[in-house]
Amino acid sequence: MNKSKQKSGSLNLTKKADYGLFLLVTLAKGKLEKKSIKTIAEENNLSLSFLQKIAGDLQKGGIITAERGKFGGYKLAKPPAKITLKEVLETLEGPIAITPCFNNTKGMGCCAHKPFCSIKNGLKKINEEIKNTLLSKTLQHFIQ
């Protein structure tokens, strides 16, 4: 019997990005209502500590705000139509780059093949198209 493993695609969202988008869409659907991370984690069977870390990153990135206290919780910092997927993914994962050559983060550079790379220009165009697509999509696309 041949058992084949299910493989994910080579370009896929990380668990962090997936949970982050899920958290943001949950908050977006709640309109102006504040919601606790604990409640979201429990209602959706997600790791509380992981979701808290993601919420912290999103708060640092200015995408969500938090209010402490009995009636506190998290909410979006701006309307869903103003939060792009590019903004979310870069906040959680860093620059959009399909290869290290397109990552502008300090310490990341091109590989040793740079002087004679025959695919760099084509991949650069694709990388820009991906970034533009992510820039054109907002959280609003998930809640319509």
Image (cartoon, rainbow, N blue to C red):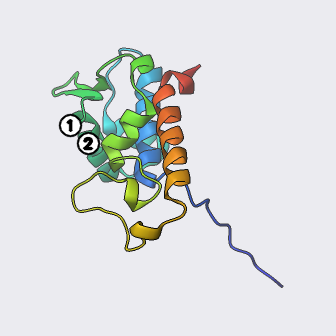
Residue depicted at 49% across the width and 58% down the height: 120
Residue sitting farthest toward the bottom: 1
Residue depicted at 61% across the width and 61% down the height: 8
In the displayed structure, 52 sits above or below 101; it is above
* Residue holding disc 1: 60
Q: Residue 114: x and y, percent?
A: 40, 67
Q: Are marks 1 and 2 in contact (CB under 8 Å)?
A: yes
Give the residue type that dot 2 points to: Asp
Instruction: Name the image quarter holding residue 135.
Output: top left
In the displayed structure, 109 sits above or below 43; it is below
Q: Residue 29: x and y, percent?
A: 47, 21
Give the residue type that dot 1 points to: Lys
Instruction: Name the image quarter holding residue 87.
Output: top left
Q: Could you tell me if residue 51 is visible in this image? A: no
Split into 4 quadrants, where in the image is the C terminus?
A: top right
- Left-right relation of 22 to 65: right
* Residue holding disc 2: 57
Residue depicted at 68% across the width and 67% down the height: 6
In the displayed structure, 115 sits above or below 134; it is below
